[in-house]
């Protein structure tokens, strides 16, 4: 089984920065993709950024130019550096990992970490 543990959320003023981390533990095997998603109140969960094993990245238009996703394959950890934060970035941020191990393929989510941006 694979577990994801996020950290780094919190309260920040508009224009500030936060760095989220997500560590995968357990029988991780090979993690193909990591992703960060977010869900604001009364809104659907949306993609923020994703990164493949070889470092190819993609970003939602809403965060492009303000956020950077990166990963440390040796530590099975993904990061999301968010700069120039806006109140509309307020949401619960979820980490996602897609991969395979000796137990088969998996697609797992973390428990979420709250990010609140005050105006």
Image (tube, rainbow, N blue to C red):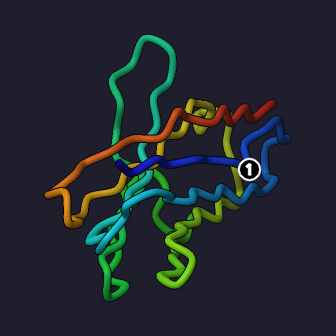
| Quadrant including the C terminus | top right
- According to the picture, the residue beneath numbered tag 1 turns out to be 8
Against 7, residue 28 (above or below) is below
The residue at 20%/66% (across/down) is 102
Does residue 96 appear to the left or right of 95 in the view shown? left
Out of 91 and 66, give the one closest to the viewer: 91
Does residue 10 appear to the left or right of 104 in the view shown? right
Label 1 SS: loop
Circle 1 Cα neighbour tier, 10 Å, few/some/many (<14 / 14–19 / ≥20):
some
The residue at 33%/45% (across/down) is 108
Image quadrant where residue 21 sits = bottom right
Does residue 29 appear to the left or right of 39 in the view shown? left
Against 72, residue 11 (above or below) is above
The furthest residue to the bottom: 54
Out of 93 and 87, give the one closest to the viewer: 93
The furthest residue to the top: 42
The residue at 75%/55% (across/down) is 18
The furthest residue to the left: 104
The percent coordinates of residue 2 (x first, y second) are 39, 51
């Amino acid at each position: 089984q694979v577990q994801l543990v996020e950290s780094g959320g919190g309260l920040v003023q508009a224009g500030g920065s936060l760095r989220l981390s997500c560590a995968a533990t357990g029988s991780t095997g090979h993690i193909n993709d990591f992703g960060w998603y977010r869900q604001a109140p009364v809104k659907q969960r949306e993609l923020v950024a994703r990164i493949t094993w070889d470092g190819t990245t993609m970003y939602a238009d809403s965060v492009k130019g303000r956020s950077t996703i990166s990963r440390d394959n040796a530590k099975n950890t993904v990061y999301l550096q968010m700069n120039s934060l806006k109140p509309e970035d307020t949401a619960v941020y979820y980490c996602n990992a897609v991969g395979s191990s000796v137990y088969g393929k998996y697609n797992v989510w973390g428990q979420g970490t709250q990010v609140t941006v005050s105006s």
